[in-house]
Image (tube, helix red, strand yellow):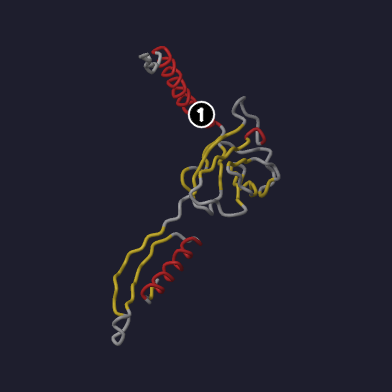
Amino acid sequence: MNQQNSTVIAPKRPNFKVIVIGVLVLSAIVAGYFLLKKDKQQDRSQFAKYIDAYTSGIISKKSYIRVHLANSVSNTTDLGETDKKLFDFSPSIKGKTYWIDAQTLEFRPDENLEPDQNYEATLNLAKIFPVEEKLEEFEFDFKVIKPGLAFTENGLVSQNNTSLHLMKLTKRGKHCRCRRYRKYRKNIIAQFSAKAKNKVEP
């Protein structure tokens, strides 16, 4: 009787040299990311001789984007709207740029900004006055506030003395002034009216 020889192949273990190389490459990528991030922050501080203040942090969807220059611009003779394309945004924002005074630029969007959206902005300084090499564009960012909606329930009470099976639920809401709130309010009223014939008072 012939016996068949079976061969068991053990799985190959990862080469120690390959693991070390992988760890080194990953470390280099992470270190490069943080160094690049740090360089950007350092570069922004170098703009202090040109930029005094700018829009940042969390802003309203109706806000204008402003940049206040460190010095007056001598070649700005007429205040108001300028035809020069001085700002770029990502995501893109359509609007117009105005000189408020000899040191202040203001971008006014044509429509409300998108809620809960992060924007990256670039101001082309080289189009305003001569600047040092590598400082031609000033980059900054901001975020539009996220709409909020909260309700405080005041409880169920009888709608009147004759119809005790009809109840009334009262609520008090704190909200931002936005179309989304009005949509939620209509949905809440509709849901309570359909389920229990309740009346929701604003």
Q: Residues within 10 Å of mark 1 (few under 14, many from 20)?
A: few
Residue furthest to the front: 1
Left or right: 153 in relation to 125: left
Q: Residue 134 in the image: state x and y as whole percent.
A: 60, 26
Residue to which mark 1 is pinned = 40
Q: Residue 135 in the image: state x and y as whole percent.
A: 59, 28
Q: Is residue 143 above or below residue 33?
A: below
Q: Residue 191 in the image: state x and y as whole percent.
A: 41, 69
Residue 17, picture quadrant: top left
Residue at image coords 55%, 51%: 113
Q: Residue 93 in the image: state x and y as whole percent.
A: 61, 47
Looking at the rendered structure, the secondary structure element under dot 1 is helix
Left or right: 113 in relation to 13: right
Give 122 or 174, whichever is nearer the viewer.
174
Residue furthest to the top: 17
Q: Is residue 151 above or below residue 138?
A: below
Left or right: 18 in relation to 131: left
Going by the numbered disc 1, the residue's amino acid type is Lys
Give 31 or 11, whichever is nearer the viewer.
11
Residue at image coords 48%, 28%: 37
Give 20 or 64, whichever is nearer the viewer.
20
- Quadrant, the C terminus: bottom left
